[in-house]
Image (cartoon, helix red, strand yellow):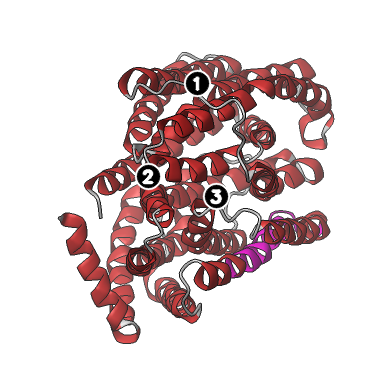
Amino acid sequence: MKKKTVKNIIFSLLTQLVCIICGFVVPKIMIQKYGSEIYGLTTSITQFLAYITLLESGIGLVTKSALYKAIALKDEKKISSILHYTQSFFNKIIIVFIAYIIVLCFVYPNFKSATSFDAIFTISLIIIIAISCMFEYFIGMTYKLYLQSAQKTYVVSYIQIITYIINTITILILVKLNCDIRIVKLASSFIFISRPIIQKIYVKKKLKIKLDEYDKNYKLVDRKNGLSQHIAGVINTNIDVVLLTIFTPIVNVSIYSIYNMIVSQIRTLINGFIVGTDAFFGDLYAKEDKEKLNKYFNVYETVYLMIVTIVFACCIILIVPFVKVYTLGINDADYIQKLFAMLLVFSSLLACIKSPYNSLAYNAGKFKETEKGAWIEVIINVIISILMVNKYGLIGVIFGTLFASIFRGLEFLIFVCKNLLERSCWVSIKKIIISIITIFIIYYLGYTYMFNNIDSYFHWLLYGIITLIVSLVITIGLNALLNLKELKNAFVFLKEVKK
């Protein structure tokens, strides 16, 4: 593998590590200072604002797919044409974005979960949180997409690391000074505005990309299919919080957000391997080098699934004890939700297992071919969640996500194996079954023999180290027993990475 790919992976993982640390520090401070209800409100508003990414219309995925080929062929005019088209598209929809914010300001304060807050307070929070979203999508997104496609994800990662650290320090200071939540959120928004500005300056000055040298007639071919996939993805990602906001007390959003914060950070950390290798596999597909694509993807899949197994085996055992310690002293909500936690972790596990396959499909530009499955996933998720949320609350929305993830994961796996890798899907299914069996064995051992009373970060860390060691031994041991050939190939792969 290229050194640039390894560099991207390292910086992506470092970014996620910083994000995890900052992500654990900030919520607890916010809940302790402002309470579970206000924290739940800010989380809910953020999720509603996430729907503005519908305006992106999936153009990001299609742009990256088109850029892989243009960059591989060193076609500078086409690169400029793709970037100019993308930026023009973002410029046109900013008015729609502003209209959406105005509508949200009128509608959101009337939701059941928001009626306990003053309308002016809620509206001001919506506007403040929306500021950074607007700048991210309509100023810097085009340049971010180019950096990722050109195998320069490490640049984006470096900018993110710096802004995460500055944002966390700023929040700590403002909370210590007893500032209003709106002042804290406004400061965060201004810090995150710097990201797209720096990305734009870097690309224009360092890489000397000129958007004025373009083909006026250029259009992204798969934009409509990318739009469909993107809308479906946004709905699936945010439907849980939306339904909890509409049908249940706001405190449920706070409980959900704490657990989801943990699994989301873990998913983001694991997806660092995906982001770091996206451009590498996209480049191989663009060059039609199927032999290398199969070779590298096969061993990459083995390494990736082993990492996913170890991480989620630890997560499913340690998540509730962590939340117990994390929320000590917070008594305005019951944060100990064992069944919900287990289902959420398993749902996130399935999403991570799916990632290499859907990533490869998107990098290959297969948006039209996988479009129908995206909407079947949405239908499964929405119907089950709506039917169950009133009676079962948190558990109800997770069941919808869980069944939808199972369907979509199988669809992507079968499609990629059949159409891109041209191999039997049982090669992948065997690895996945081994991973799931391994996790359940470790989970059984963890709850049967290891954990009773964890009441401090020290005890949690001690048991975490034990769990990690046990997970490593059992995962490597079972793969050596049931999947020895692939394990040997994985070690060869790691040696090649060092070169």
Mark 2 vs mark 3, CA separation in Å: 41 Å
Where residue 12 appears, as percent x and y from the top left, is 35, 43
Q: Looking at the figure, which quarter contains the C terminus?
A: bottom left
Residue 296: say if magenta: no
| Earlier residue among tags 2 and 3 | 2
The image shows residue 374, relative to residue 21, as above or below, that is below
Dot 1 falls on a residue whose secondary structure is: helix
Task: Tell me which amino acid carries mark 2.
Answer: Ala
Q: Residue furthest bottom?
A: 481
SS assignment for the magenta stretch, majority: helix
Where residue 139 appears, as percent x and y from the top left, is 53, 20
The image shows residue 203, relative to residue 436, as above or below, that is above
Q: Residues within 10 Å of mark 2 (few under 14, many from 20)?
A: some
The image shows residue 313, relative to residue 44, as above or below, that is below
Task: Name the foreground residue: 166 vs 450.
Answer: 166
Range of magenta residues: 391-410
Front tag of 2 and 3: 2
Question: Pointer 1: what residue?
Answer: 188
Query: Could you say which disc has been placed on residue 72 in the image?
Result: 2
| Earlier residue among tags 3 and 1 | 1
Question: Pointer 3: what residue?
Answer: 259
Where residue 394 appears, as percent x and y from the top left, is 69, 54
Mark 2 vs mark 1, CA separation in Å: 38 Å
Residue at position x 82%, y 34% from top? 111
Mark 3 vs mark 1, CA separation in Å: 22 Å
